[in-house]
């Protein structure tokens, strides 16, 4: 067959219909382009917030903390009583709430134990206090327990949060510097840390409170000297994991100074564990302050904290148990809520928990 005939055959050979494949380019307008909304990129903190909201216990704890802070701010001003005002004519009155008293609860009745059994008394009626209401009752000096409870919660929160923030700054800086420089610097700083950790914290706090004038600032100072050890260990451990990473070596190559690398390059990458540790440190500080106030080494009178209120209620627990219930419940809710928030933040800030 000649060359011309071969070309003619090839020219008139019928072609198979074309089948599109995945590798073909498709031209679409901007309006036709579809974006995968489920996996759209978002900021780190938005992702953290989303994962924290999925942790129901953490959200509940956060709401409880907000409610307690709200009442700690406005609670002492809600019923017209002052937290330090005394009225011996109104001492040891049971809880009485307007409106609810008609339902037979919180109406001022109190069961008293006697040698012949128990009897129900109402000191409001016996003393002719028809227009007097103490929502949580009154103590042995006639002070309103509602006002004192929220005033005590305010004091305890201020002490715990202030001491924890100061401890975070001191412990975080100490641990980061120790872990970054390493060598002899790390050895000396860790030996100092071991000496500080070897002395019982309660002994240090007690001695400070005996030497210095008791008060809010003294308790914050005492907690500041003892509670930073745990924070420094976490910061040092995170530093040892990150200081050999590529971005740190790149900063060193570009001539960045050590403290710039520590606080501008490495610190933002360990903020998650730091925040989590802060949330777990707040209930510890609340408990320590309450214990010191309970044993008489805390807030001086006429000021009050949750620990001093529990101490006062403990003295009257057998005769008037309602006096200790409110401060114990508020302190227990505070400690539980901060622990729940810390647990939720630990999962939200940990990238390894994202797929779980």
Image: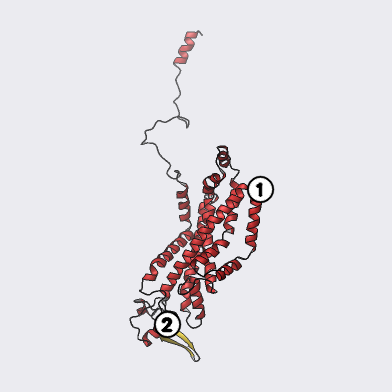
Packing grade of label 1 (10 A; few <14, some 14-19, many >=20) is few
Q: In which image quadrant can residue 191 be found? A: bottom right
Question: Front-most of 177 and 283?
Answer: 177
Marks 1,2: beta carbons within 8 A? no
Residue at which label 1 appears: 183
Q: Position of residue 23 (x, y in %)?
A: 48, 30
The image shows residue 117, relative to residue 190, as above or below, that is: below
Mark 1 vs mark 2, foreground winner is 1
- Badge 1 element: helix
The image shows residue 299, relative to residue 34, as above or below, that is: below
- Residue sitting farthest toward the left: 131
The image shows residue 23, relative to residue 280, as above or below, that is: above
**How many numbered marks, from 0 up?**
2
Tell me the colour scheme of the image: secondary structure
- Badge 2 element: loop
Q: Which mark is residue 66?
A: none
Q: Which mark is residue 91?
A: 2
Q: Position of residue 255 (x, y in %)?
A: 56, 38
Q: Position of residue 93 (x, y in %)?
A: 41, 81
Q: Give me the C-alpha separation between circle 1 and circle 2.
A: 64 Å
Question: Front-most of 139 and 35?
Answer: 139
Packing grade of label 2 (10 A; few <14, some 14-19, many >=20) is some
């Amino acid at each position: 067959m000649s060359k011309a005939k071969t070309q003619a055959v090839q020219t008139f050979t019928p072609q198979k219909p074309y089948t599109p494949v995945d590798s073909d380019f498709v031209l679409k307008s901007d309006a036709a382009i579809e974006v995968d909304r489920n996996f759209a990129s978002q900021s780190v903190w938005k992702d953290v917030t989303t994962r924290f909201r999925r942790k129901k216990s953490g959200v509940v704890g956060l709401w409880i903390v907000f409610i307690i802070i709200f009442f700690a701010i406005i609670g002492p001003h809600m019923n017209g009583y002052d937290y330090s005002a005394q009225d011996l004519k109104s001492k040891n009155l049971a809880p009485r709430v307007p409106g609810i008293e008609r339902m037979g609860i919180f109406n001022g009745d109190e069961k008293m134990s006697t040698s012949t059994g128990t009897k129900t008394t109402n000191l409001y009626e016996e003393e002719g206090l028809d227009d007097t209401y103490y929502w949580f009752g009154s103590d042995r000096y006639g002070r309103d327990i509602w006002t004192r409870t929220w005033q005590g919660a305010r004091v305890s929160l201020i002490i715990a949060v202030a001491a924890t923030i100061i401890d975070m700054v001191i412990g975080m800086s100490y641990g980061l510097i120790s872990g970054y420089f390493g060598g002899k610097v790390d050895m000396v700083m860790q030996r100092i840390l071991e000496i500080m950790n070897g002395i019982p914290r309660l002994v240090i706090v007690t001695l400070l409170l005996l030497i210095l004038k008791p008060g809010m600032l003294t308790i914050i100072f005492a907690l500041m000297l003892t509670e930073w050890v745990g924070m420094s260990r976490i910061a040092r451990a995170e530093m040892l994991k990150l200081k050999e990473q590529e971005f740190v070596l790149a900063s060193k190559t570009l001539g960045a100074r050590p403290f710039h690398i520590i606080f501008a390059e490495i610190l933002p990458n360990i903020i998650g564990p730091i925040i989590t540790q802060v949330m777990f440190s707040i209930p510890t500080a609340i408990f320590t302050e309450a214990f010191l106030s309970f044993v008489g080494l805390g807030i001086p009178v006429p000021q009050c904290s949750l620990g001093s209120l529990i101490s006062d209620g403990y003295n009257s627990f057998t005769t008037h148990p309602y006096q200790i219930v409110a401060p114990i419940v508020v302190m227990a809710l505070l400690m539980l809520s901060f622990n729940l928030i810390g647990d939720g933040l630990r999962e939200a800030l940990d990238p390894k928990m994202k797929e779980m």
